[in-house]
Image: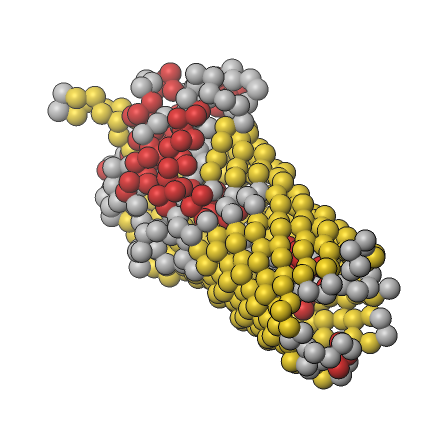
């Protein structure tokens, strides 16, 4: 992990808030929603088909439609987070929110090949960023403020000069303004110091509240060739909307009231919004009436993203200055420095990973043409995501400001941090005339190369369905268990400490639809 951080701190920060490897992972390690039926069988839809949610897994599955269909899938998601930081366990607040599963329209029409062709337009929540993480602990090793001291030390500016530089991050400029970071002559040498380092015992508290998600509109076409081969493709337009509100507090736990540090609080509101484009192609082969085999490829999503940040800091440095407390905001810094327009916005491009999906299905009673007499099925997907291939790109080519070299280092850190991941999904359905019972399981492996970082996701699901007279309704409950890590800050000259996170949550999803 040390090498990752060094790659990022070799350069003076070129952005309002430097993108980190986590920003790539947020859009890469996703577990999308779907219809209630698809989610009930673990999300496995690579070879089964006959579902509008196939547009987001393997669009060839749309070729199995024989009627038109309109579908709506509202849902509700709730979760709670538990964390452990430096041996201290903490529970975060519950985060609840509305969730939209795959909804849309499927149109079936006859083609020249003697089979049916299908067009679909659908919308789906591909990722849900809602969470509320809180952790705290006693740190005797490092301080949040040291990241600002490092950036200032590497910038080459003096304290007063750095305050007016838009290529220095807001956090560092605010730390200088409040004297949380300063210079001092020690043993005849001018050095950069972070005041909290004088304490040696720091109580750290970090609260992160996130909201938003990725919603994708998909336009899909599929064809059925002699009821043996099914071929499909979709064009996706993902819309990303992410907001993170952070409140970080650090206080002196040494008991010394004359060491130039009492406490500081950093608050930040960060938003990331963008629009993208991607493609999905797929094939399903039916060698026999009861068997289906599927293959699908998802291209990277290419996003144009704009980030904005608003931040503030309050520092209490005891007798170090004539003021017991100094506060400043990012907007005030820009106004005082005459920076116009404000340096609180940055635009760049993001490329997400490739995905490859292999799938197989077995239908009980699949040789019976009348689907009402079929008894059920079992189906499974194996998905590989090239997580480490995510990359950032400046909106404009290098104009001498060093953006290209900054993003080269960032992309190297992403590649060094992450590895390819597997997603394994398994599910089945039992048909009881007009009623169905379903169950499923899904597991997503650790995206981190560092074996010390533990992360994975497990989902267990079950549901029921009813079909009669051209309309249908499905109800599903999905229970999720996730592990991940969060770094409160990153330093280039010290090992970094992460909080371990455990998230438990559930989603209730209802799908109603009509065939016509």
234 with respect to 325 (left or right): right
Q: Which quadrant would residue 182 be assigned to in this image?
A: top left
In the displayed structure, 323 sits above or below 61; it is above
Residue 98 visible in the displayed image: no
For the C terminus, give its image quadrant.
bottom right
Q: Which quadrant would residue 242 be assigned to in this image?
A: top right
Residue at the spot 26% in from the left edge and 27% down from the top edge:
192
393 with respect to 378 (left or right): left
Residue at the spot 44% in from the left edge and 24% down from the top edge:
403
Q: Nearer the viewer, residue 485 or 342?
A: 485
Residue 21 rendering spot, x and y as whole percentages: 42, 42
Residue at the spot 33% in from the left edge and 32% down from the top edge:
9
Q: Nearer the viewer, residue 212 or 274?
A: 274
Residue 189 visible in the displayed image: yes
In the displayed structure, 202 sits above or below 11; it is below
- Number of labels in the image equals 0
Residue at the spot 46% in from the left edge and 28% down from the top edge:
15
Residue 199 rendering spot, x and y as whole percentages: 25, 41
For the N terminus, give its image quadrant.
top left
In the displayed structure, 440 sits above or below 219; it is below
Residue 132 rendering spot, x and y as whole percentages: 51, 54
Residue 232 rendering spot, x and y as whole percentages: 68, 53
Q: Outermost residue toward the bottom? A: 432
């Amino acid at each position: 992990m040390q090498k990752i951080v060094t790659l990022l701190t070799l350069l003076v920060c070129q952005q309002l808030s430097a993108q980190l490897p986590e920003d790539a992972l947020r859009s890469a390690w996703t577990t999308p929603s779907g219809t209630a039926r698809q989610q009930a069988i673990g999300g496995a839809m690579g070879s089964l088909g006959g579902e509008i949610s196939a547009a987001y897994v393997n669009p060839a599955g749309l070729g199995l439609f024989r009627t038109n269909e309109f579908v709506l899938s509202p849902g509700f998601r709730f979760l709670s987070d538990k964390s452990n930081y430096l041996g201290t366990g903490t529970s975060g607040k519950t985060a609840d929110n509305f969730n939209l599963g795959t909804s849309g329209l499927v149109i079936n029409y006859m083609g020249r090949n003697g089979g049916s062709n299908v067009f679909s337009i659908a919308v789906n929540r591909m990722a849900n960023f809602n969470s509320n993480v809180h952790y705290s602990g006693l740190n005797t090793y490092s301080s949040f403020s040291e990241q600002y001291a490092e950036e200032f030390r590497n910038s080459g500016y003096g304290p007063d000069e750095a305050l007016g530089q838009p290529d220095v991050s807001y956090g560092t400029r605010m730390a200088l303004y409040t004297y949380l970071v300063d210079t001092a002559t020690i043993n005849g040498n001018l050095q950069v110091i972070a005041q909290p380092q004088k304490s040696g015992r720091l109580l750290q508290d970090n609260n992160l509240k996130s909201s938003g998600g990725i919603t994708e509109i998909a336009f899909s076409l599929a064809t059925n060739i002699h009821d043996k081969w099914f071929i499909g493709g979709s064009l996706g337009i993902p819309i990303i909307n992410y907001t993170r509100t952070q409140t970080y507090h650090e206080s002196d736990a040494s008991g010394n009231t004359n060491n130039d540090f009492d406490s500081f609080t950093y608050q930040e509101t960060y938003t990331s919004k963008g629009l993208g484009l991607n493609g999905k192609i797929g094939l399903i082969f039916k060698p026999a009436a009861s068997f289906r085999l599927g293959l699908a490829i998802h291209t990277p999503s290419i996003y144009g993203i704009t980030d904005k940040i608003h931040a503030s800091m309050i520092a209490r440095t005891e007798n170090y200055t004539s003021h017991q407390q100094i506060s400043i905001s990012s907007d005030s810094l820009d106004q005082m420095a005459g920076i116009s327009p404000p340096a609180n916005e940055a635009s760049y491009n993001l490329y997400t990973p490739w995905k490859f999906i292999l799938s197989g299905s077995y239908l009980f009673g699949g040789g019976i043409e009348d689907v009402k007499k079929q008894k059920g099925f079992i189906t499974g997907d194996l998905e590989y995501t090239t997580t480490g291939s995510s990359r950032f790109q400046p909106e404009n080519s290098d104009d001498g400001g060093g953006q290209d070299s900054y993003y080269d280092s960032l992309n190297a850190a992403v590649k060094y941090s992450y590895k390819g991941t597997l997603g394994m999904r398994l599910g089945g359905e039992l048909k009881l005339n007009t009623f169905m019972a379903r169950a499923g399981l899904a597991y997503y492996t650790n995206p981190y190369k560092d074996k010390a970082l533990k992360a994975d996701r497990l989902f267990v699901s079950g549901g029921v369905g009813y079909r009669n007279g051209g309309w249908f309704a499905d109800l599903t409950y999905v229970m999720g268990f996730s592990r991940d890590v969060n770094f409160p800050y990153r330093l280039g000259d010290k090992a970094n400490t992460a909080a371990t996170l455990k998230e438990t949550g559930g989603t209730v999803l209802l799908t109603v639809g009509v065939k016509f």
